[in-house]
Image (cartoon, rainbow, N blue to C red):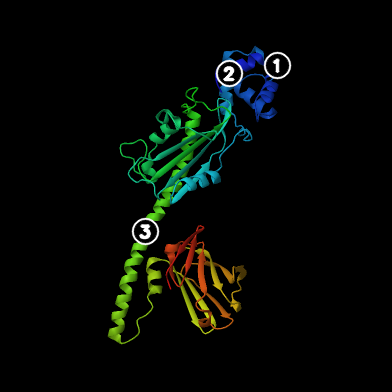
Amino acid sequence: MELGTLMSMLRRAEHTTLESFLVNSFSRIGRLTAKDVCKKAGIEPSTRPDLLGREDAIKLLDAFHSVSMKSPPVDCLSPITERLMYESIRKEYDVDFIATVTRKPSVYKGYPFLVEGAIAYGGELPKDERATILRFANKVPLLYQQSACAITNVIERMNWKLYSLQQPGGGIPVGPVVIMVHVASVNIPYLSEAKEAIAHVPEIEREIEGALREVGRKLRAYLSKKETVSKRKGKELVISKMLPLMAEKVGEVLEREPPDVEPIVAKIVGGIHIDREMDGNKVRIKVRNFSQKVQRFVLHELCEHTIKYPTPHPSENMMGNMYDYSWDIRIRPDEEVDIEYIVEGTVEGMGGKYLTILEGVEDELVVGDVDEVLEGGVKWLRSKR
C-alpha cells in the first residue's frame, strides 16, 4: 500500500478510533490483528485516525508488513485455473508435456492479485527458436509491448539452464517451449492506458518468478525422466537383439532349444516381466518385478468368455462385448505375483480374441506378453504378440 493512499484514508476516516478504522477499512483485519498492528506501530488503538500524521502513517505501513495476516479473499479474483490452462494449451499446441500452477493470492499496494503459470514442451514446436510467450491479464491476452512487460522481464532474467533448457547469451530460452503467465487482480498495474503490458511491481514480479520456477521444476523432472527412459530403451533394444542370437548359437552348440530371453532382458533393464502361459482352457500369468522400487498398477484381462476360479479374485466389468477382469497389483522388487483362472471353452477356440492390458505403469518398464500399456491416460500400442 502506498503512503499517500493510507494518509488520504486516515484524513477521510469517519471512525473515532484507529482500531475501528483498521477493522472496517481493510479486508481480513479483525480486532486482534488491529491491536497487533497498533502495538507494532507504537500507536494507541483508541487514537483518532484523522489526527495521525505522516510519521504515524509510515509506522502503520511498517507494522502492516511485520504482522502476520490472512491472505486476501479470492472471490474478487478470476483465475483461469490449472485445468483450463492445460486444456487450452493442449488444444492449440501439439506438445509432449504440460505443467500448470495457480499461486496463492498475494497483495501489492493493498490490492489482491494472483499469478498463474504454465509451460509446454516438445511435440511439433520449433527446436531452434526462442520460446513462445503468452501473456494474460485478467484473462485478456497482452499482444503488444512484450519487451517492456514485467512478465517478459522476469522470464529473461531467470536462469533457464537450471531447468534443462538452452539459454545462449541469456534472455528468453531457446527450444520447443511455450511459456504462459496470467496475472489476475482487481487493479492490474499497466504501463500505460493502452493496457498492453504490466508494470514492474516487485510483489507481482516475485509471484511471476515463483510460478515459473514451479513449472520449471516439473519440466526438469520430466526431461530427466525422459533421458533416463531413453537410455533404458536403447539398452533394452541392444540387449533384445543380441541375446536371442546368443541363445540361438548356444542352443545349436548344446543341441537344445534356446531359452526364453525375455526374463533376462527385463532383469538387465530393471523392468517388469509379464509371462502368460496357456494350457487348454487354463491361463496362468506370472508378473515379476525386476526394478528397484515397489510397482503398483492394474492388470486387465479382456476376454470374450467368462472365467472361472480366478486366483486372486478380480474386479469384473463389461467393455463392449468383452469381459474386463482387473487385478490391482502391488509388487515389491524381485517379487513374483501369479494370476490363474480357467476360461469357459478352450483358449485356442477363442480365435485369439483376448487382450492383456497394464494400466498405470511406464511403457518402457514392461517386457513380455502385453498387448497395451495405459500410461497416464495415454494409450501406447505394443506389438509383443
Which secondary structure lies at badge 3?
helix
Residue 291 in sight:
no
Q: Residue at coordinates 37% horizontally, 37% vertically from top-left?
A: 172
x and y percentages locating residue 133 in the rendered image:
43, 38
Question: Which callout, 2 or 3, points to the residue nearer the camera?
Answer: 3
* Badge 1 or badge 3: first in the primary sequence: 1
Instruction: Work out whether residue 88 or residue 182 is closer to the camera in this orientation and state it.
Output: 88
Relative side of 365 to 311, left or right: left
- Identify the residue position indicated by label 3 in the image: 230
Determine which of the numbered discs, if any, sits on residue 365 in the image.
none
* Badge 2 or badge 3: first in the primary sequence: 2
* Badge 1 or badge 2: first in the primary sequence: 2
What amino acid does circle 2 point to?
Thr
Relative side of 246 to 74, left or right: left
Determine which of the numbered discs, if any, sits on residue 14 in the image.
1
Cβ atoms under marks 1 and 3 closer than 8 Å: no
Instruction: Work out whether residue 31 or residue 314 is closer to the camera in this orientation and state it.
Output: 314
x and y percentages locating residue 347 in the rendered image:
52, 81
- Identify the residue position indicated by label 2 in the image: 5
What amino acid does circle 1 point to?
Glu
What amino acid does circle 3 point to?
Ser
x and y percentages locating residue 302 in the rendered image:
55, 71
* Residue occupying the far right of the picture: 16
Q: CA distance from mark 2 to mark 3?
A: 58 Å
Instruction: Work out whether residue 192 or residue 227 is closer to the camera in this orientation and state it.
Output: 192
